[in-house]
Amino acid sequence: MKKATNNIWVGEKDLTRDEQFIQDSQKELSLEETMVSDSANESLRSNRRDFLRFLGFGLGAATIAAGCDTPVKRAIPYVVKPDSIIPGVATYYASSYVNGGDYASILVKTREGRPIKIEGNDLAPDGLGKTSARVQASVLSLYDVNRLRTPMAKSGDGFVATNWSELDKNVGEALKTASNVRILSQTIISPTSMKAIGEFAIKYPSTKVVTLDPVSYSGLLDANETNFGKRAIPSYHFDKADVIVSFNADFLGTWVNPTQFAGDYVKNRNVSDLSKAKMSRHFQVESHMSLTGSNADNRILVKPSEQGVAIAYLYSQIVGGGSSAGLNDKAKAGLSKVATQLKAASGKSIVVSASNNVSEQLMVNAINNALGNYGSTMDMSNALYTRQGNEREFNKLVEDMNAGQVDFLIINDINPAYFSSMSDKFAQGLTKVKTKVAFGMAMDETNNQADYVAVTPHFLESWGDAMPSDTVVSVIQPTISPLFESRQMEASLLHWAESANYDPKAEQPYFDYLKYSWKDGAFANQNSFASFSSFWNDALHNGIVSVANQSAGNAYADGGSLTEITKPSSTDMEISFFETVNMGNGQFAGNPWLMEMPSPVDRTSWGNYLAVPVSFNGVSKMVGYNDLTDGDIVTLTIEGVEYTLPVVQQFGQMPGTVGLALGYGRTMAGGTGTNIGVNINNVVKNNGGYANYYNDNVTVSNALSKEKEFSCVQYHHTYGVTAEDTATGKVINADEAATVFFDYFTGVTGFQGALTDRSVVYTTNFKDIKEEVKDLTKKRETAQFLNSKQIYRGHDELYKNGHHWGMYVDLNACIGCGACTVACMAENNVPVVGKKEVSRHHEMTWLRIDRYYYGDVTNPNVVYQPMMCQHCDNAPCENVCPVNATNHSSEGLNQMTYNRCIGTRYCANNCPFKVRRFNWFDYTTADIFLANQVNIADEEIPFGADNLTRMVLNPDVTVRTRGVIEKCSFCVQRIQEGKLTAKTEGRQLKDGEIKTACQTSCPTEAITFGDLNNESSVLNKKIESPLTFIALEEVNVRSSVNYTLKVNNRDESFDA
Amino acid sequence: MSHNKNLVYGLYDDEEILLKAVKQANSDHLDIDDVYSPFPVHGLDPLLGLAESRLHIAGFVYGMLGTLTAFLGMSWIFTKDWPVIFGGKPYWSVPAFIPIVFELTVLFACVGMVITFYIVCGLGPGVTNDYLDPRITDDKFCIAFDKSKVDVSKVEAFFQSTGASEVSHKSI
Amino acid sequence: MSAIISPIREPLITGNKTYHQITEDLVSPTEEMPPLGWVIGFILSVMGLGVFVFTVLWTIYQGIGTWNLNRTVGWGWDITNFVWWVGIGHAGTLISAILLIFRQKWRTGVNRAAEAMTIFAVICAGQFPLIHMGRIWLGFFIFPYVNTRGPLWPNFNSPLLWDVFAISTYFTVSLLFWYTGLVPDFATVRDRATGFRKKIYNFLSFGWTGSAKHWQRWESLSLILAGLATPLVLSVHTIVSFDFATSVIPGWHTTIFPPYFVAGAIFSGFAMVLTLMLVTRKLLHLEDYITIEHIESMNKVILLTGTIVGVAYLTELFIAWYSGYVYEQFAFFNRALGPYWWAYFGMMFCNVVSPQLFWKKSWRRNIWLTFFLSIIINIGMWFERFVIIATTLARDYLPSSWSYYSPTWVEIGIFIGSLGLFFTCYLIFSRVAPVVAIAEIKAILKYGGNQYVEKAGQGHDSHSHSEDAH
């Protein structure tokens, strides 16, 4: 019973480790004893029975002995079965995801009481029910081993576990004497939380609330306050915009509410029906290739410090006035063109900026106003509240703290000690605050400096609500009872406030309080329900309710100074700091799924890589800035602060600039996030109290060494980028030239067409779409003609019956955000392998998003191609497996039998799409040998080995052991579930009833799964589009996944 | 391999003398029991009236057996026992069977023949056959007569005349 | 002797050997203490074998992750070594079988050792398909054994399964062929031995007596085995080439592979035979049996097959260009000029350029040059397999998945170790069994012994040489 020590106990004796009992339990397996007992009795009958008993027991003993040890049983049966749970059937609960300014209305999939997957909520209005990679990954942080088990109290340098009564007592005393109470919180969009804080403030009148966002939006908010008297962000309708201009705003990846924006954005870029093809044009003004920039039609390159003047220039073109000295001429030329196009699209355009400078945002507002966008493409009356951080107040707080004018500080789940541009001053200030109480799930840089850490539950364990916009309120409901001794922030505040409306003795006190607050909150603002209970049940069921808009009008009024724009700097090197989809500004660093997820644009994971510009040397080489190549280690000096970090060549990075992602270099982010990458928040420029995410005092050294573990999942980035050949002066295909390593002194510069003529992905410009479609059709016909010449007849007649599963991926809708890749990991128990393994190309992702740059090498366009198993009907992998471990189902699925696989990897070699993944080591810690378990981040136990993290595993999907191949299964478990449901309900399977994990997670609905045999299915409708193609069709693998011709709306007059 | 035969045998130093001697013996109507040599002496078999070996016929039969086993086996497995779709191939994907059919043909033929060879020759691991003279596997060529079948004196005279280097008697 | 004696032939056996001397010369190595050279070689080989055992166990215990293979390059040194060893394993059977059918008498000097080499090379080759499995402990899944899982059978469409059958058949047949040839010679050893050695060799010799009937059956068996082994030896590397030819990966999916692989196999096999024979004849003083004549004949074969391989390389390039198929074109463009250009260059130089030296007779007959080139050629053939496997996989259809591969110490260790395994086996063989087929040598003494050849050659111009042994 050795294993019993890992805190699983089978009986009370076992728990108390009763010596006698343990000895007996070992004897259980010894035959001798029973022998003795047998020889005792003589009768023939009992002998025969004993014989059988031995036979059975002998077998049993042998089996167990084979296992070397009594297997630990983790299955604990229900004593009383909950009505809501049917073992083996998933239950979904509506809830809301609110974290670091991100909001999503979600459905939580639970199995046997465990939340294991998060889906978007289709019932949510305004596309608020779409998920991002962050939302998808949030379920894993519920089972984070680094979460605090109990409230903690500071003692000396460290912390000791305490309990709530103890903590309440101490905090209560501290509050009695407190004269200046401050609550520092991330944006709170929960009406009930505000109510609770309100009650707290009544009890302790000195209370002031200061909010801060990980990445600041103060400039925008303050500008809006000036222009609209409303400190909020308008809701944008990118679907209504024909011209979109974004000044460095990554609105598809990270800016304000990207999932909502992305969903709208692609609506106006759908050209699958040629007859009414119409496409918005998107200009991105930036220096670093952001996710949004990668989707833009034209990118206008300006240095970070030029953003101000760039906006000013556009302002001067559209509104008039404003100085734009110092803007580079190419940008000037471009922006003038942009201006004319904007004017042409008045009322049907959007101009956004990520600038954190009030004057610049005022100009942007003025531009939008002049274009008449308010009320059409932008709506201030139904505003978004997901970001409310106020830097001025925060700076004030920091000053007060340093001046010793704050004696009680409550820190609500926010980590300024890490992400604030004035983190050092903040840290100093903290030392001067008498009592510091931090709410949080785990230790971080800020909590670590508090006196008490009041451990809070994960949002999947919490009650709550959220009001992201003026017209929407949504519920947060727990999907599992708290795993640890945690208590919600609101509950604590109410408890300390000794609120009359809050009964700590109640079974779920905050639940009651929530309902109480809703009675005169949301319930009052609606008229569809008469009784509260029915209203409440409906709200819980849908997770979201629309309410009457309570906020005032949104008349635009000029105001504020437009002169304090960022001054263009003359230094020859600038750096821009940006937020990535996966890391945010550090709040997701502790999440292995997000850490392992490659950043969509540079395809690196596990660390932030300095993006350096790259150009073609005119012969046969892509040359990075300072001759830096991928994975070179350099010293980056920003305002005297030195960082040593690896670089990655970034196409589309403006010469004279470099870029670096925020959110890395956490020093307290648990096993996964700690000391991964570098933290540059402390060198973020601070102009007039506003964090400006760039710096112009930068030097980048030459290559010092090579990074040992260059964790980039894509080595070849380009798909036929063009550049000028210095020898001939002709424009040639640069990356084809760059495939030559040694030309035997023949001067061969690559044979042209090696990449562009591939049938992997097709791209075109919107104006050439007709011709391109003709070519594509011709190519496809040729391929199909060749394929018709195969010697084998195939199994078409068989596939005609029943289902034949297929998929359609709309490359014009895919923005590369990577939500699907994380959703796939969550759904299919795909292991996390860690930096070293990723650097060896051992990543296990079933679904990856290939990213190719095409067009001009200095300012390319980008195409994203989600690549998963194509479930070929002529699958090359199936023919070559010697042991029959992979073969084809009658429904057209390429199925993988893990326990039959012996790992010859022949199938992976023979896969033209390279989507098969091999378990090189024991990533899932399911193996017979301990030795080969990969220790991802020096944790005591490898990731996923602990019982807590294992709770996230999807019980419907096998966990793969070392030495077997795995790959995308088209979520076969979902297919089976759907078929079974239909069968039990005795009906036909409905189209769209079965959705794969990637499909449901996609905010732009780029992925469609369905039955090819169902003529009326959405899938077949989409496939009919003339833009449809099949990757590598002429290889005749007959894949079941269809892609679309990628169309961009680039204005080529800019390239002149 | 008859046992307990009383043999009289003579040793020769060269296969050409041996061949002459065998011819002589045939003309003298001496019934040679067996001839032993360190290597196969060409032209000896007809003189001794040895029928041509039928091993190759056996080999052919074994080979056919292999062919059928492989082809019928695979066909049955893929069409009857458990048909599985591999990469769009028909269940009965004959061209893909050819390599294995060929290999098993060869395997059966060779193994079968070799086993047959050792059995008919009465050879095999652990078998010990008495032999007349250790030098037979070195450089001596031996003609042996069964005393019960020939007149020993005549034989000894024969050995004398044909130039045997030694004559001796042994019972095996 | 019934065989036709060509008077204008160089003797195959020199030194006026008598039958007894032949026995003496060839059996004595099994009776004496090994020479110092042998002992040193043996120690080195066993050390290599140790490396092999360690690295293999390490791989099995830790996982294939100890190799540098990745999601794009699923096969590297493992299968490269496999194909390389199988290739080497072709010369033996080829020499014995095909040359026997063509009645090439010169083969008798070398066939025994060559067959031994074949068997040991196939043993080495056989290791790699096992080692490269992710779950070697389930390797038995590849056998079509009757089971209760359905029953579940292997996939007879898979070239890997064809390999299983081809390699095991080839091994069995070669072993039988080789051993049957050994039986009379073991008898010879037995009859000189005493005491315990006698017992052992008595067991090994299967009670051979040298009876005329046995010799007759023995010869007809050898001939039929040879007849069967000839198509077999061609089929084996053909099937190995199917591993690649039947795939869809550009650079693998090539119809030229079967002949090209077979030629390459003979090429590398002969090179390895030469490497070994040149050492063996020195160590065991067999200059009289393995003469310059033998060496030259084998160098001719090397020149021929090397040139065939060269033509194959060029044909590949031409077809790639001619196909007009971009992936095929790029695959070969990339082989020659891509990141692995050095491997391609090495392959071309070692396999195509270096053997051309053998056009010159005096160089064909130069032992040191032969020895050097035989090693160069083996290196070149290893490069060829590496080029075909690794460089093709590293850059195939999807540029996003392009990758680069270089081995870890474990993979290198396994390769070095397999050499250790091979030489350990060979060195043991060279002490326990006659490395030259005694009976067969005796059988051709009258035909190829120098004293007889010169006698027969009198009156002829014994300096005019026909180009080839017909």
Image (cartoon, coloured by chain):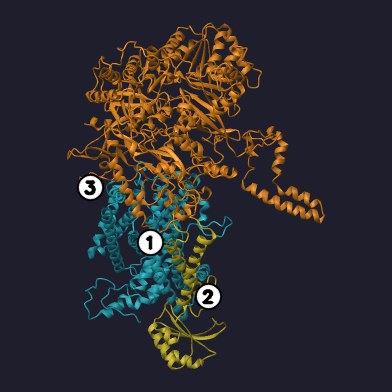
Chain colours: A orange, B yellow, C cyan
Q: Do the residues labelled 1 and 3 touch (CB within 8 Å)?
A: no
Relative to B70, does residue A426 appear above or below in the rendering?
Answer: above
Task: Say which chain tag 2 marks.
Answer: B
- Visible residue check, residue A529: yes
Percent x, y of residue A1023: 40, 43
A80 horizontally vs A636: left or right: right
| Mark 1 and mark 3 on one chain | no
Of all chains, the one bearing label 3 is: A
Q: Where is residue A715 in the image (x, y as percent from the top left)?
A: 35, 39
Quadrant for residue A79, please give it.
Answer: top right
Tell me the residue that label 3 is attached to. A744
The residue sitting at the left extreme is: A728
Going 26% across and 79% down the picture, which residue do you hit? C457
Check the picture and name the quadrant holding the C terminus of chain C. bottom left
| Residue wearing tag 2 | B119
Q: Which chain carries label 1?
A: C
Marks 2 and 1, Cα distance to the nearest angstrom?
Answer: 34 Å
Closer to us: C57 or C40: C57
Disc nearest the viewer among 3 and 2: 3
Residue type at mark 2? Answer: Ile
**Is C402 placed left or right of B100 in the picture?**
left
Label for residue C238? 1
Q: Residues within 10 Å of mark 1 (few under 14, many from 20)?
A: many
Instruction: Tell me the CA gap for discs 3 and 2.
Output: 63 Å
SS under mark 1 = helix
- Amino acid found under the numbered disc labelled 1: Thr
Type of amino acid under label 3: Tyr
Q: Are marks 3 and 2 in contact (CB under 8 Å)?
A: no
Q: Is residue A68 above or below residue C187?
A: above
SS for callout 3: loop
Residue B48: x percent and y percent? 44, 86
Residue C395 position, x and y percent, is 34, 46
